[in-house]
Amino acid sequence: MTDNDPPITDSAPPVSNAPSTQQAIGTAIALLALLWLFWSSGFAWVIILGVLIKAAVYAVSAMSLNLEFGYTGMLNFGQVGFMLVGGYTFALLVPHELGRAGTAGGSWPIWAAVIAAMLAGVVLGLVLGGPTVRLRGDYLAIVTIAIAEILRLTVRSFSAFGQSFGIIKYTSSFNDLMPDFVRGWAGSLDVPENQLWLFIVAWVTVLVVLGLLSLMIRSPWGRVLRSIRDDEDAVRALGKNAFWYKLQVLMIGGAIAGLSGVLFALDLNQISPINFLPLVTFFAWTALILGGAGSLVGPIAGSVIFWVVITQTSSLAEDLFPSMSSTAVSASRFILMGILIVLLMVFRPEGLFGKREELSLEIQ
Amino acid sequence: MRSSDTILKCTSVRKAFGGVVAVDVDQLEIQRQGITALIGPNGAGKTTFFDIITGFVTPDSGTINFDEADISGKPAYSIARSGLVRTFQLTRILGKMTVLENMLLAAPNQSGEQVLNTFFGRRTITQQETANRERAMDLLGRFSLLPLANEYAGRLSGGQKKLLELARTLMTDPTLVLLDEPMAGVNPALGEQLLSYVLELRDEGTTFLFVEHDMDIVMRISDRVVVMATGAIIADGSPDEVRSDPKVLAAYLGEHAEEDLAEAEREVEP
């Protein structure tokens, strides 16, 4: 599903129904990024799939932020905490090995573990939202950033979570589900079977989440969310329970973030607290802002562009400045990303796919 | 006869901010179907009183009955849902949504506002949206906003925003409408239009309570005028009664402004 589907509410302003030049430019830039990835990797599918899996993981995460911030105006700066509870719940429930001793455990079937991971995100959303959603947006931002750190330090401290050694060998039950045709394709593309399987599952997840979000957003429910983003008091005066809607958004956003945590864990192969630094949150935010908050496809395009730039600039820098040290090369990609975002904020603050009229970098 | 019922009844409503008593109303009853004006000098507590009635501010004490049900302490959204809907002194249209979206948002009992129905109840949603859109277009037509239906509401002029806010309020199917300075910043022509709608709706059975500073308008359209000063109701009656009440003039002009009374009287008279 794309932004061009006919909405069921007459809600979208006329400009957004026709493919605008802005959307054409956004699509072109995303395709250019893909081309760059193909060219820069020398058409090595292992590299291409690796980057695109990361892009899918962060696309799901950014879509969850988009529901919260882009459509409802709520600031969640602790997205990595939601990904952590999703990833850890999943890894601990399916067969795995835990901690320094590598204690074997877990017996849940994979579908049940995925549902549990999403429910963990829902619960975290409820716990965070209950006390803070009635307050101004800044409070939610502060609480989320704090809880994400608390969660990371908690799993690092308790042996039940494997402490700093984390969890390993939890991907086998996922890889066992691989259908045979994937093996055939992996052979012809010359990539590991498991990688292609994860690539397929990750991008199917992206599309499913996009489809569900699109149904939700283009409905009277989504209209209430956008009105809350605009002016919460006006919405309450019209008989809508703004508090309950915001709580719903945190729960649904939490479930999606939990799901992205599962994909994150599957991509990493082993998880430990070091994987869940606040940086993860800011990567997801960068993807969202690049693509455009409040647009359905924005976070996906943003995530692809983000990961192509982050992973491919080092090889570009190496080619352009052969004398540069490897530390400088590695730093150069973040410098480029920073410049890109500054340029974006100056010339297109609404992101590649966002609507300038709805630009809402303001806090509820 | 139902039309003479009391629709709103406030008893001993009190609210203080720190040491300042903002509202201290012993008794106020509003009758069904009519236009009641709430006037008073700046700082009299009119808007706070509105906030209390509509659940945006919790009073320190007192009870409020609407349509025979006790609504004191209920959240704002549930009061609005029961048919008591307000507008704001500073217009609160949703600027980043279109005029039509503003209207559709206000429609009551939408099944599409339940998240699960957005997956499994698409047909009902589409039917409701069609019906709501028809009603919204009809209302927008009455308020001369139809050509602007697909414009972002933030682009409207101040007066048009006031019209939209009133139209949106009516979209909720209210029984009692609280208007907080509906004429402020509206040009006279648009204002006349707005007034004629209010009168029309009164005749159709809607009850209005409104705050207004323009005495000319207050005296012309109100069936009853309630005067507040320093939080309390100091006068209550027909426009003619209130106009000649010396307490009202004193409240507006200060206790020692006897010499200005004559001038004030001229101003108050239509």
Image: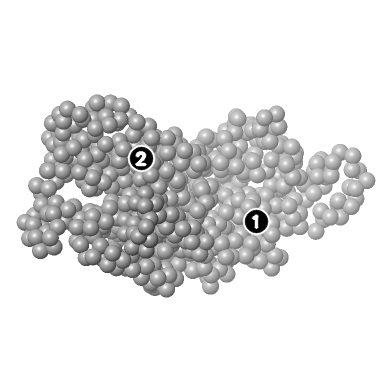
Q: Is residue A232 visible?
A: yes
Judge by depth and name the residue closer to the eye, B48 or A52.
Answer: A52
Q: Residue at x 45, y 67 (%)?
A: A13
**Picture quadrant of residue A193:** bottom left
- Left or right for B67, reference B44: left
Mark 2 burial class by Cα count in 10 Å: few <14, some 14-19, many 20+: some
The foreground one among A357 and A325 is: A325
Q: Tell me the kind of residue under disc 2.
A: Leu
User: Can residue B83 be seen from the camera position used here?
Assistant: no
Q: Where is B33 relative to B131, above or below?
A: above
The answer to whether B43 appears left or right of A26 in the picture is: right
Separation of marks 2 and 1 at Cα, in angstroms: 52 Å
Image coordinates for residue A346, horizontal then vertical, percent: 52, 61
User: For mark 2, what is the residue?
Assistant: A277
- The subunit letter for the residue under badge 1 reads B
Q: What residue sits right under mark 1 in the picture?
A: B182
Where residue A153 sits: x, y (%)?
A: 34, 31
Residue density around tag 1, few if under 14, some if 14–19, many if 20 or more, within 10 Å: many
Please state if B8 lies on the left or on the right of A335 as rendered: right
Q: Amino acid at mark 1?
A: Pro
